[in-house]
Amino acid sequence: MPNAWLVSPPYFLALGLLTGVVGFRMGWRTRSRVALPVVQGMLGWGAFALAWSFLGPAWSAAVAGAWALGTTVVSIYVFWGRPGETDERVARAREYRAQMLEWLTTGRGPEVAPFRMAVGHLRELIWYLAAAVATANLASLVLGAALLNYMNAYVATLVRAARRPGTVLLLAWNVWSIVRVAAYIGLGAASARPLLTLAGLPGDAGAALRLAAAGLAGVVIDLALKLALSRPAGRRLARAVDLDAARENRSSELALRLDLS
């Protein structure tokens, strides 16, 4: 029974979640913008590769998803409490926050320039897939960790400056962004198969193809949701956040008053 548990899907999902948490904590302690995503990605890839060896492509993608969830939960908590250190240690944290707060302030989202947005997403996807194919998903998980970090830093800013915490917790991670992360995880796992096959770990070809198809569908759904929901979601989220506090990377005045009372 213990041996069966060690090669079961729940074990590997728990392992993926744990590597997300531990990888972030280890990387954070390096105080390096470069080392943080590298350490995160390396630990996540270890869980991914083990799951591929025992369970195949589909479950290895699920384990990568658990890794992303683990690193997201712990990073938002840390970023929420340490805004200054976050800006120093997370690449693109300031730039991404400014870009997203501009969207919330003006209401002008990707629907203003859909072609430019699509081209930007395509360029990002090509780099991600090239990294996944060339390194059996290792470099793409490092890139994914970097992306998650600056997105989670922005989410932590919104939570810190929230006037309506429930609404912020519900909407801070945009639904299209969640779809995109899931799509990239599936595509990264599928793209790892050629190199893993050369290494003697072929995995199920049909499962890899299904992951690739689902990932490509997710990319399209991401774009459609972003164009359709950006404006209404942005308006509702903007009303729930003290945007002045968010721009200054501090707590809202309401939160400060509640703390003092």
Image: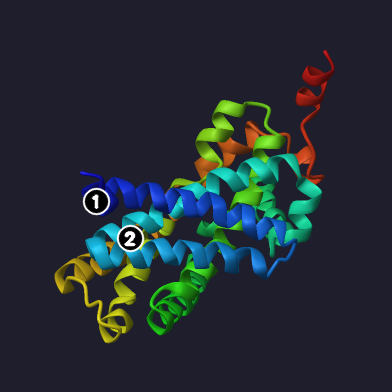
Q: Earlier in the sequence, mark 1 or mark 2?
A: 1
Label 2 packing within 10 angstroms: few (<14), some (14-19), many (20+): many
Q: Is residue 178 above or below residue 133?
A: above
> Residue 219 location in percent, x, y?
37, 63
Q: Is residue 64 left or right of residue 26?
A: left
SS for tag 2? Answer: helix
Label 1 packing within 10 angstroms: few (<14), some (14-19), many (20+): few
Residue placed most toward the observer, 138 or 2: 2
Residue drawn where x is 24% and y is 63% of the image: 54
SS for tag 1? Answer: helix
Q: Is residue 137 left or right of residue 2?
A: right
> Residue 229 location in percent, x, y?
45, 46
Q: Marks 1 and 2, how far apart in space?
A: 22 Å
Q: Is residue 165 above or below residue 238?
A: above
Give the number of the disc on residue 137.
none
Residue placed most toward the observer, 245 or 205: 205
> Residue 261 location in percent, x, y?
82, 12
**Quadrant location, the N terminus:** top left
User: How many marks are shown on the rendered structure?
Assistant: 2
Residue drawn where x is 15% and y is 70% of the image: 206
Q: Is residue 171 left or right of residue 79?
A: left
Quick check: can you spot residue 68? Answer: yes
Q: Furthest-top residue in view?
A: 261
> Residue 72 location in percent, x, y?
54, 48
Marks 1 and 2: which is nearer the front? 1
Q: Furthest-front residue in view?
A: 2
Query: According to the image, label 2 marks what residue?
Result: 61
Residue drawn where x is 68% and y is 56% of the image: 28
Query: According to the image, label 1 marks what residue?
Result: 3
**Type of amino acid under label 2:** Ala
Quick check: can you spot residue 117? Answer: no
**Type of amino acid under label 1:** Asn
